[in-house]
Image (cartoon, grey):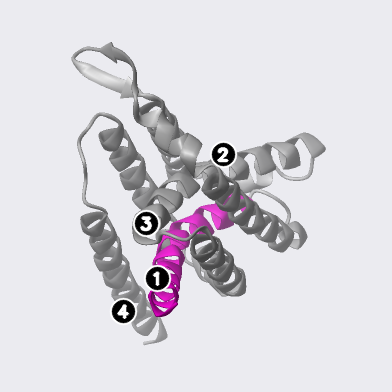
Amino acid sequence: MNDALISLFTLTILEIVLGIDNIIFVTILAGKTSPEKQGRARTIGLFMGMFVRIILLFGINWIQRQDHTLFSFAGHDFSGMALLLIAGGLFLLFQSVREIHLKMRGETPEVQEKGTKYNWTTLMLQMLLINVVFSLDSVITAVGMAKELWVMVAAVVISMIVMLLASKPIAEFVNANPSIKILALSFLVLIGVSLLGEAFGQHINKGYIYFAMAFSFSLEIINLQIDRRAARK
């Protein structure tokens, strides 16, 4: 029982760390709707992520069976999992680069895409797809760290409750600092590239990626503090 509790605690912390990317991207997507709907959109997006993770955990045997080779091309063997990673990586790259491009041009998709039923449906579909991409990595990590299914499900539920409580202050911070939003989108480009690398058999240690994220974020926080002090003076 003690081993299970230790696994639960460790896995919950890791799920929270992995979920920060999810919160940020859900926040960016929620910004496409009107201000009064953004909180609702974030909550739906995060609950969607929790349910997707739990469904994938119950279907973990099916996921693990996707490792066998389906076909070979240009000297690479492609399995069902590799195709999922390629699709997820390309989706992350497309969404992230598109958002960065629009912001560099000074356009505001948040204004252009507000209000219609079609765009709300599109927003929910985008959130579902992004949750599936992030959930694959989360579920694979959970299976590697815990043996009991209840431990993995409990860790996902607890981490999601923490993320729901933290989503509003994180959203306010991201929306108030455009440079943080660009930095977050750049992180998602990095994660998309890592998913593509995994699909082609090039394992990239996640520790390096998250260290780079933490280091860049720390520097940006220092830079924001310097700018605010300079503005006050």
Q: Secondary structure at mark 4?
A: helix
Image quarter of residue 37: bottom right
- In primary-sequence order, the first of circles 3 and 1 is 1
The residue closer to the viewer here, 119 or 202, is 202
Which segment is the magenta one?
1-30
Residue at x 67%, y 46% (from the top left corner): 111
* Image mark count: 4
Spatial CA span between label 4 and label 3: 17 Å
Dot 1 corresponds to which residue? 7
Image x and y of residue 62, in percent = 49, 35
Q: Is residue 164 above or below residue 113?
A: below
Q: Which mark is residue 129?
A: 2
**Residue 210 shown left or right of residue 151 in the figure:** left
Mark in front: 2 vs 1: 1
Image x and y of residue 77, in percent = 26, 20
Dot 3 corresponds to which residue? 183
Spatial CA span between label 2 and label 1: 28 Å
Q: Which mark is residue 200?
A: none
Spatial CA span between label 1 and label 4: 40 Å
Image x and y of residue 40, in percent = 73, 60
Image x and y of residue 18, in percent = 41, 60
Q: Are marks 3 and 1 in contact (CB under 8 Å)?
A: no
